[in-house]
Image (tube, rainbow, N blue to C red):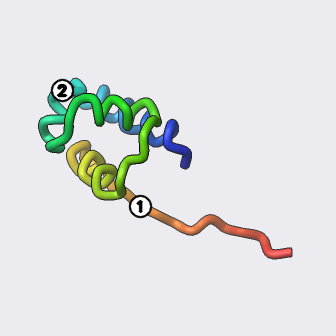
Amino acid sequence: MKPQEIGTVIARRRKSLRVNQRELAMLCGVSEHALCNLERGNGNPTIGLLGTVADALGMDLKISVKDMELS
């Protein structure tokens, strides 16, 4: 998943829970600016930040290996 897609998923989930960026940022212990960047797909968030945000939104962060066809 690309950073912008991750940001879109996070923003949609946040909005569905009727939580604004300031509230979510406070729950996660990050700045509102950092959360805004994450939702826009900007910056280079750590796995820790993604996990914290996902947890606050009641989501799981999963990493999987893509199926790769060998030639």
Q: Residue at 13% x, 40% y: name it.
A: 27
Residue for badge 1: 62
Instruction: Locate residue 55, reporting x and y percent.
Output: 24, 51
Q: Residue at 37% x, 37% y: name it.
A: 38
The C terminus lies in which quarter of the figure?
bottom right
Q: Kindly identify which numbered label has been placed on residue 43.
A: none
Q: Residue furthest bottom?
A: 70
Residue for badge 2: 22
For mark 1, give the secondary structure: loop
Q: Residue at 23% x, 29% y: name it.
A: 32
Q: Nearer the viewer, residue 30 or 21?
A: 30
Residue type at the position of mark 2? Arg
Image side of residue 22 versus residue 33, left or right: left
Give the answer, above or below, for where 4 lies relative to 18.
Answer: below
Residue type at the position of mark 1? Lys
Q: Residue at 55% x, 45% y: name it.
A: 2
Give the answer, above or below, for where 58 lies relative to 41.
Answer: below
Give the answer, above or below, for where 21 lies relative to 4.
Answer: above
Neighbourhood count class around disc 2 (C-alpha, 10 Å): few under 14, some 14–19, many 20 upward: some
